[in-house]
Image (spheres, grey):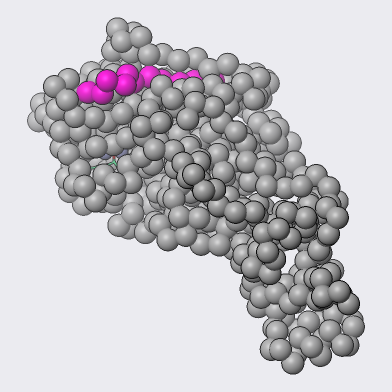
Amino acid sequence: MSSVTLFNPYLAKSRKCHVEIEIIDHKLGSIKEKSIKDAMKDRGFEAKSGQIFPVYDKDQDIKKIYAGISDASSYEDAGKIFNAAKGLFAESALKKTSFSIASKTLKKAALERLHIGWGLASYNFDRYKQNKNGEKPKLVIAKDQNTKRIQTYVEAVCLVRDLVNTPANDLGPEELEKAIKSFAKNHDLTVKTIKDKPLLEKKFPMIYAVGKGSARGPRLLEFTWGDTKNLKLTLVGKGVCFDTGGLDIKPSSAMLTMKKDMGGAAHVIGLSHLIMNLKLPVRLHVLIPAVENSISGDAYRPSDILQTRKGITVEVGNTDAEGRLILADTLTYACEKKPKMLIDFATLTGAARIALGFDLPGLFSNNEKTARKIQDLSASEDVQDPVWNLPLWKPYRKELDSHVADIRSSTGGSAGATAAALFLQEFMDKSVEWVHLDVYAWEQNGKPSRPKGGADTGMRAMYAFLEERFKK
Ligand code: BES
Ligand code: ZN
Ligand code: ZN
């Protein structure tokens, strides 16, 4: 994958056959026509989440659909309605039909979520299939909605999905660079790449060390955007295009999903898309260390002692703890530019998954208030993208002490997600407000609006937080 295309599931205008989907409440209160209300009651229609009630004209064509949602109006509701609507029409009919979503009672934000959820349900990753998945029901965005915002959300989420879903044979460090260049070009930006071996070895010794075992060379990707007068926000994303675990090799079941180990980078690209398209007034600095963690005669080893950009020496505990190494040099570099705030996303530890499962990213911050604020906001009705605060527990720092170097990269002990975060903190400047998200970047089971595979976790929550923090 060397170029990115933005996913657009929406129609600019209605088709010949247009079907309005009206969202109604459980008590059917907004239905004025008695005959329809009676028919609904007769057929046990209670407007539950995803339940639909089609109304036919005299030619037996569907002229309208009533639909129910949950109390909070969720993306999942829209996904269920999407699936139900799809099931009502033959493929040939779907090609001629457009849909819209309306409601007499819902607030604009609730309807916006349904629009976005419908778009997210339209996505599937069929790039490698000869038989593409069939025709999708197409939505026309309601006039009173913010089209740009809805489209940007769907584009951002589907960018994450596409990048993560693309297998590592087509997305190594070089292809990730090309993909980011193509993304940046759409925003009229240029990407700076540092990949020259001697330069990387000197300036970013840990990115070099982790990447040198692969024939596909490591690199650091960088771009900036926005008015230099605005507050500086830096985003850093772990871009491990494939994580074999290196010499401390992963078991096959754990390796199977490791094409997603650049999920942090994908989140940063998606979040940048939201920030730039929706014009958040910040000076944005994006940094992505891109490597492949491979096994070869050139691979770095457990017990190697690495130099770092910061000058601290690092004893490698386990070559599978590669993410924190490439991030550490990147954080040092990022902090040299004195940002106001730095956010990093990384598929960093299995331990975060053991603590929180697949759906909840672990959130760490050197500012407790900020961490709490983000956790609260993430679970709110408007955001619905929960993240969970985990401790940057100082007393555990001593577990990272090394007998031979300034610090070791892993402990092999308990609280693995905290240990990884404490390691990263060593490379942060105390004066920079820092948020670290240990994400899974993968939907394990598949839900309406959220197909199995690459998935965003915490990206929308962070955008909601940034909007609150930075919007003028
Ligand atoms: N990419 C993995 C973390 C990971 C594993 C994320 C599974 C999501 C699901 C990371 O590079 C890793 O392997 N970390 C090790 C660190 C350990 C060796 C200290 C881990 O968590 O097991
Ligand atoms: Zn690893
Ligand atoms: Zn990894």
Q: Position of residue 347 (x, y in %)?
A: 37, 42
Residue farthest to the top, as pictured: 198
* Residue drawn at 41 percent across, 13 percent down: 194
Does residue 159 show up? yes
Residue farthest to the bottom, as pictured: 42
* Residue drawn at 61 percent across, 62 percent down: 79
Q: Is residue 106 above or below residue 130?
A: below
Q: Is residue 297 above or below residue 153?
A: above
Judged left or right of residue 439, residue 450 is right
Does residue 241 show up? no
Judged left or right of residue 280, residue 213 is left
Total residue callouts: 0
Q: Is residue 318 above or below residue 9?
A: above
* Residue drawn at 25 percent across, 48 percent down: 254
Q: Position of residue 266 (x, y in %)?
A: 48, 37
Q: Which residues are magenta?
A: 213-223
Q: Position of residue 166 (x, y in %)?
A: 44, 38
Out of 76 and 403, give the one closest to the viewer: 76
Picture quarter with the C terminus = top right
Q: Position of residue 82 (x, y in %)?
A: 65, 62
Q: Is residue 437 above or below residue 211?
A: below
Which of the 4 image quadrants contains residue 83?
Answer: bottom right
Ligand 2 in which quarter = top left
* Residue drawn at 32 percent across, 42 percent down: 258
Which of the 4 image quadrants contains residue 168?
Answer: top left
Judged left or right of residue 456, residue 206 is left
Residue 215, magenta (yes or no):
yes
Out of 434 and 113, give the one closest to the viewer: 113
Residue 34, magenta (yes or no):
no
Judged left or right of residue 188, residue 327 is left
